[in-house]
Image: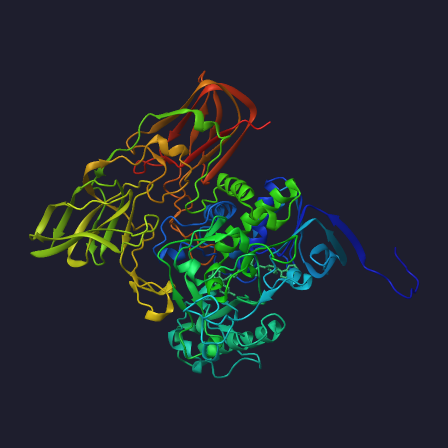
Amino acid sequence: MINEEFKAQRSVKTEMIDSDLVIVGGGMAGVCAAITAARAGIEVTLVQDRPVLGGNASSEVRLWILGATSHMGNNNRWAREGGVIDEILVENTYRNKEGNPLIFDTILLEKVTEEPHITLLLNTSVYEVTKSSKSTIKSVTGFCSQNSTKYILEAPLFCDASGDGIVAFQAGAPFRMGAEDPGEFDEGFAPDVEDYGELLGHSLYFYTKDTGEPVDFVPPSFALDNADELPRMKNYQLQDEGCKLWWVEYGGRMDTVHQSEEIKWELWKVVYGIWNYVKNSGEFPEANTKTLEWVGMIPGKRESRRFEGDYILTQKDVVEQHEHYDAVAFGGWALDLHPADGVYSDQSSCTQWHSKGVYQIPYRSYYSKSIDNLFLAGRIISTSHVAFGSSRVMATCAHGAQAVGMAAALAADLDLRPADIAKQKYITTLQRELNKRGQSIPRVPLKDKNNLVNNAQISTSNALTLEGLPPDGPWQPLRYSTAQLLPLQAGTSYSFTFAAKAEEVTTLEIALRTSIDPYNYTPEKKLETQHIQLKEGEQVVEVHFEQALDQQQYGFICLMKNETVSIRTSKKRVSGLVTAYNKVNKAVSNFGRQEPPEDIGIDAFEFWCPNRRPDGNNLAFTIAPAIRAFSASNLNNGYTRPNKTVNGWVGHWNEEVSRVSMQWDESQTISNITLMFDTDFDHAMESTLRGHPERVMPFCVRSYRILDNNGEVIYEKEDNYQTINIIELEETVTTDELIIEIERPGPDVAPAIFEILCYQID
Ligand SMILES: Cc1cc2nc3c(=O)[nH]c(=O)nc-3n(C[C@H](O)[C@H](O)[C@H](O)COP(=O)(O)OP(=O)(O)OC[C@H]3O[C@@H](n4cnc5c(N)ncnc54)[C@H](O)[C@@H]3O)c2cc1C
């Protein structure tokens, strides 16, 4: 029993924790930075003020994680972010393809607690910063109300991933809040702040459920009583819940840090007001048996402070896809700004303008320019308000945060400050270490002289020579202009055949297009257009394009919309092949073509986007000359996903087991093998609400064995579903040959590997 006498004062229990890196904020940025740093070998303390991880992606807020794939609604092909965020989303799709936010919480908690080098402090709010010099943070202090403990966290390096920048702010780091003048960075999309406001607001969501019996709703007295007058209510549909209610937004004209509670109360008024209208106005009779299942308690915060690094990312970086020597991450969500009045605004709830492809984000945007030991991650990184409109989405935040985690490990190892890593010699190391873990920095190939595969003779039992795809899929009406994307050679004139079925005599327009930038997939360059007469009924259509591409890149064989024509498809799935459709995806302001006002510095172009499975079959076709872009030489070309070409070895769907062999002139001692598979970087993998058709991406190799030169199996895997398999052999192997036997993923799917890395790690 405890029975304490009166004391003049008591102090709460205090614990000191020393680590190499303290990360404040356990949103997707904090989580991915922590896992990356811990796996790179440093001791990390991750502090999160709430009971679970994920920030806006957690079950407390329930946003779906989005990024460069943009719901598969823009021209960024194979653009899902790589590395830890990919591992998490692939795991979530495997365990939780239905998108239950509670399951997603468990995945994040598991991933973090499985890392022995992470100390996780949940329910611990950091509220104080101490400094050892004007520009150096010494410690941060947090308090956990659940165990009534104060934590003093010391480290040589800190990362602020808290969203509002609680550490950077108190440390005195320079920051911006609100919109820049259009002239400052020559940003035509910078808003007119009088009219549009300066900040994006917070939002709260709700979920409903059908009880099967009539349910009454008596609104709380604080509920809005005129929700029917909200401009956006005219578009509301009863099935809208969770992220689809993103427009329930407020607070963009307020102090989004210090007035957060007031903003939340206003949003609760709106949410319960909407539900009162739905239940009691008589306008939604189908809502009679429905009840509220969940209402957000913590508002999702979009925007507050942005801290200044050595580089400020701007609209031009995004739209013009500027290259940076220190690129460590990429973005690809639209520049996406909202009127500050949110749900009360008469203006469109958001304005989104896309780029023609993904853009690089430089390392210099990820640390404070004034606080020597402070990294920035998540939405607070160094961008303008306009560029933030794109970089703020969670997969982009997480991807950049991985670069922070890796940079922190390098800095800790070499006793450097974050800004030192921006020197070319360290950036090269940082890029390499990130790319080894699948970061896929655009236009920056993985070059690693220690990768033993670089000295091997690589051969395979087969490599696809693509003469075409068989007509074993359904007929597909040409309701939308449809393109087959193919990795074409420079200077080659191709002939192409496909099966068409016309309801009447008609003319079909067929075009060969490509992108001006060979790394993009916006088919704005029209090389050749032909008009072909079709007779009524089934027929084989032949087309020969005289024009050739002037460099190796993807060509779009475009069959333009004709509602009287159907095209035969193929069931075969081949890594690096996809069809794209010139159609609308309103969720991301894709109306088939983007037509911005002329003076805002944004390009006009068409959208050609893939269909989600189970649709999105390739077309059935033949092509001559055959495409030979799938060879073993891709296995160490440094690219781990398609860009100008496939970049992977792809076998043949007819061969049940394929073999990849790596032979060396001399025996090698190997302890570590990394295999990078195809988990369809085109698939957006939203983390919640939206379900997915499969748990495992159809292209992904499930089963394989690795053998040495004696035919001994040194490693075996079944039921793989992950992109990257890092194999740490129990015993090192000395051999002059490694053979990988790969089972094809399915009878209609060609096996593929993008990259193989082999190391001797002592
Ligand atoms: C309504 C809304 C809709 C959006 N739509 C999407 C979308 O559909 N998809 C998408 O990808 N992005 C979307 N975004 C943007 C995205 O959610 C944010 O930009 C992103 O979450 C920022 O990531 P972050 O890790 O910086 O911050 P957060 O996700 O906010 O994570 C920061 C974490 O830090 C913690 N923290 C804060 N202060 C402290 C402290 N003092 N001590 C300890 N921990 C602290 C917080 O609890 C939080 O968990 C949306 C944002 C909002 C608000």
Its colouring scheme is: rainbow
How many numbered badges does the structure rendering display?
0
Quadrant for the C terminus in the image: top right
Name the spot of residue 713 as percent of width and height, x first: 47, 22
Report whether 348 appears left or right of 559: right
Name the spot of residue 521 as percent of width and height, x first: 32, 51
Q: Residue furthest top?
A: 710
Q: Is residue 114 among what the camera can see? A: no
Report whether 234 appears left or right of 474: right
In the image, 74 versus 329, the foreground residue is 329
On the rendering, which quadrant does ligand 1 occupy? bottom right
Q: Residue furthest right?
A: 5
Looking at the image, is 125 positioned above or below residue 517?
A: below
Q: What residue do we see at 56% from left, 77% from top?
A: 266
Name the spot of residue 1 as percent of width and height, x first: 88, 55
Looking at the image, is 53 positioned above or below residue 548?
A: below
Report whether 588 appears left or right of 36: left
Q: What residue do we see at 33% from left, 25% from top?
A: 461
In the image, 428 versus 742, the foreground residue is 428
